[in-house]
Amino acid sequence: MASTARIGDQGVVNSFNLFVDTDRINVTGATQNRGDETMLHFEGNSIMAGDGELIRMTLISFDMFNNFYTMDRYNSNLRFLHKGGRTNVYLQATSTTGLGVADLYMPFKNYGSLADIGLEFAILVAKQVAARSLIDVDASPKVKITSMKNIYKEGSTALSTVSIISTTTSADFATAMDSGTRLTLGQTSNKLIDITLDVYKADGTTSHTHGITQLAIQCVDSKGDSHLILGAERFDSPYIIDGMESTDDIGNSFTVTFPTVSSIRIRGYFPMQLQSDPYVYLRCDLTQSGGLETAGMSNSQFNTSSNVSDLISSDIFAKIRRDTAFCTYNNTADDYFINIQQRKVSSLKLYLTDSKNRAIGQDTRVRTGTAAGWVENENTNPDPVSFGQDTLGNLSFTCVIRVDIIKTSQVTKLETTPLPLPLPARKAQQGVIFGLPDFGMAKIGV
């Protein structure tokens, strides 16, 4: 049996375009507005719907420059844990079980190939291995990346020519970064990261026992999505014990083995990828728009208790594809719209997030820093700084929203004969005061 829609024939009563440009929005509008989060006050131009009408907003177009990196604070974190070696050396935390712990960040930037990401990952881990290996009698030991399978061509020897020290960067591997050596996405490869590190004495040529008995590299869920980039297992284990963060868990997101007493091999489980989130999400504060989303898309804080429902009310207006230079959407079939349940709209908040409702590249709580991350030593000092990319810089967007007032039903009102106007007092006396016609006669002189 055919069903009938709740809303029958819909007709557009009124329609107009709303043009938005958030560049300098804190100067031309409210001072608290930002390029990626703005509150529009309609004031005398409030949008109103009458009886039997609703307000529908449809995104016609959206444009912004892609001025944020594919590797940022949400997909660059790694937790390094080890036992053995120099157990008295820690970067951030210690425990009674002799476990060394450090939170690391890969450099924030755009990466052109999986080999570029793999090299930065290998350098980051190699520096920690050098710092935690048993001390050489002459000086601190050195570490070399002797193999990077699947993302560099077999037989590449340039990797093993550079000794990793505290100041080593990917620029020191200029020969290894040659396009003829690294594998790109179009070339044959299983894209599984497979790195071997070898520890040497201070001379850089004599093998040295590192003394590390256990090593774990964790892509912790509460820290972001680095597991998606590196093809590792997401680490979901809780860290809060008695109100304190536990550092005694040696679980691993990679397969870590020790082929020799002086070498360490690290392998991923799944294919690597260049970015973790290919979309930007435009959201609004009109949460009663009728849309739904999976619970994880509104959860900016991870490792929380399970949601009772898989689906919740959504404030997502649209999802916009991130291209190399732009984030652009042009309406072709009214894909993104919201039906507003309230009769009057006097303000509208628009803001940008990633797929998990986090401010793009910024601290979600205070929205400071830059969408690209931070500058200068961001991987060793990841505290937000007050660079105003969304107020004084180039983080802003433009969009066009079509506003329609739609007639959804014909409202029928109850109509009755109106009560007659009361008679003047001199006439109202007839048959009212005394109830008899003789006594209700008009008085003399009236």
Image (tube, rainbow, N blue to C red):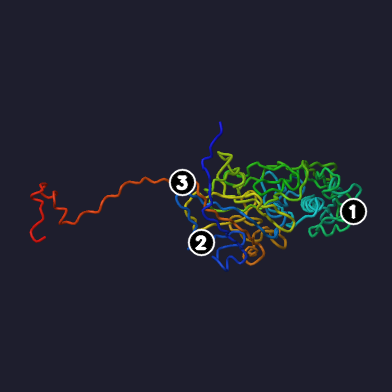
Q: Quadrant of residue 61?
A: bottom right
Tell me residue 5's x, y (percent): 53, 39
The tag earlier along the polypeptide, 2 or 1, is: 2
The structure residue drawn at horizontal position 61% and vertical position 67%, both measured from the top left corner, is 24
The tag earlier along the polypeptide, 3 or 2, is: 2
Q: Which residue is mark 2?
A: 42
The residues bearing labels 3 and 2 have C-alpha atoms spaced at a distance of 28 Å
The structure residue drawn at horizontal position 51% and vertical position 53%, both measured from the top left corner, is 13
**Mark 1: which amino acid?**
Gly
**Mark 2: which amino acid?**
Phe
Q: Is residue 222 above or below residue 350?
A: above
- Disc 2 is placed on an element classified as loop
The residues bearing labels 2 and 1 have C-alpha atoms spaced at a distance of 58 Å
- Disc 3 is placed on an element classified as loop
Q: Nearer the viewer, mark 2 or mark 1?
A: 2
Numbered tag placed on residue 410 in the rendering = 3
